[in-house]
Amino acid sequence: MRDQGDRAAASRGEQIQAAEHEEAKQRLLAQAEKERIPAEETTRAVPDRRWRRGQH
């Protein structure tokens, strides 16, 4: 009987660990979404004048 109790405890521990893992994953995804830069902003043409410094 003790073996069955050990398996139940291990199973419960695995369930808790899986739930914590999922919560951490959701927090990371939420943070990444909050910090995400829309593609429209990353592909917008911005003049880069650094290369012209020596051409005056």
Image (cartoon, rainbow, N blue to C red):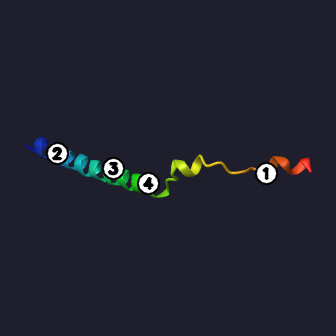
The Cα–Cα distance between marks 4 and 2, rounded to whole angstroms, is 40 Å
Residue 23 percent coordinates (x, y): 32, 54
Q: Quickly name the residue at label 2.
A: 6
SS under mark 4: helix
Query: Do labels 4 and 2 touch, CB within 8 Å?
Result: no
Q: Secondary structure at mark 2?
A: helix
Q: Of tags 1 and 3, which is closer to the observer? A: 1
| Mark 3 secondary-structure assignment | helix
Q: Which mark is residue 35?
A: none
Q: Earlier in the sequence, mark 2 or mark 1?
A: 2
Mark 2 and mark 3 lie on one chain; the one further toward the N terminus is 2
What amino acid does circle 1 point to? Arg
Say which residue appears at 84% left-offset and 48% top-offset: 52
Write down the residue under mark 3.
21
How crowded pointer 4 is (Cα within 10 Å; few <14, some 14-19, many 20+) is rated as: few
x then y, percent, for residue 46? 68, 51
Q: Which residue is mark 1?
A: 49
Residue 25 horizontal side relative to residue 54, left or right = left
Q: Residue furthest right?
A: 56
**Of discs 4 and 3, which sits in the foreground?**
4
Point out which mark residue 33 bears. Answer: 4
* Residue at screen point 45% across, 58% down: 34
Residue 27 location, quadrant: bottom left
Determine crowd level at label 3: few under 14, some 14-19, many 20+ residues with C-alpha closer than 10 A.
few
